[in-house]
Amino acid sequence: MECLKFPDYMKHGNAIKGVRAIGGYRLRVVFQDGYIGEIDLGSLLEKPRGPLTEAFQDPSFFARVTVDLDAAAWPNGYDIDPDVLRYYCEIGRVCPREELAAAFEKPELIPMTLNDKQKS
């Protein structure tokens, strides 16, 4: 499974130890440092933005989340970087790309993520 990853400078050492769907588009995520968070990803997945996100219209597909290369991943190749997922959990919501970029302090280097294609 191929994963889109953020540049190395964003790697804050977050790694996902366990993840499970807990209803709707909510995930419960256990990180390797012991932090446990819950996040609703509905704003990312309720409206398909391409072939990879169309699969999430089926709630049983969302429930097939696993851990792959330290990220939350699904069978179709869609994944969410553990640093991004940790940030979402800590602030309690999915945030706009600009806010995420500012949080990681290098906005010019942040690729588009959580979409079907990476922008360069």
Image: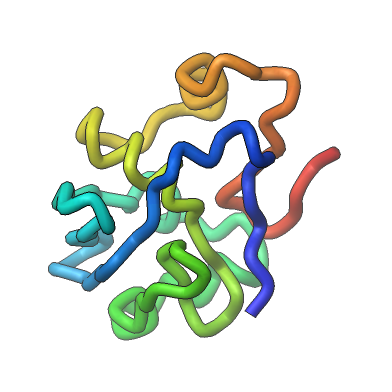
- The residue depicted at 37 percent of the width and 78 percent of the height is 66
Question: How did the renderer colour the structure?
Answer: rainbow
Along the viewing direction, whichever of 107 and 70 lies nearer the viewer: 70
From the top left corner, tell me how far across and down residue 21 is, in percent.
22, 71
Along the viewing direction, whichever of 108 and 14 lies nearer the viewer: 14
- The residue depicted at 46 percent of the width and 71 percent of the height is 73
Is 23 placed left or right of 60 in the picture? left
Along the viewing direction, whichever of 37 and 117 lies nearer the viewer: 37
* Res. 54 image quadrant: bottom right
- The residue depicted at 52 percent of the width and 69 percent of the height is 69
Is 15 placed left or right of 25 in the picture? right
The quadrant of the picture occupied by the N terminus is: bottom right
From the top left corner, tell me how far across and down residue 61 is, in percent.
38, 82
From the top left corner, tell me how far across and down residue 51 is, in percent.
66, 71
Q: Is residue 93 positioned above or below 31 on the image? A: above
- The residue depicted at 43 percent of the width and 71 percent of the height is 56
Residue farthest toward the right in the current orientation of the protein:
120
Is 98 placed left or right of 111 in the picture? left
Along the viewing direction, whichever of 12 and 59 lies nearer the viewer: 12
The quadrant of the picture occupied by the C terminus is: top right
Q: How many marks?
A: 0
* Res. 105 image quadrant: top right
Q: Is residue 113 positioned above or below 90 on the image? A: below
Is 23 placed left or right of 18 in the picture? left
From the top left corner, tell me how far across and down residue 114 is, in percent.
56, 50
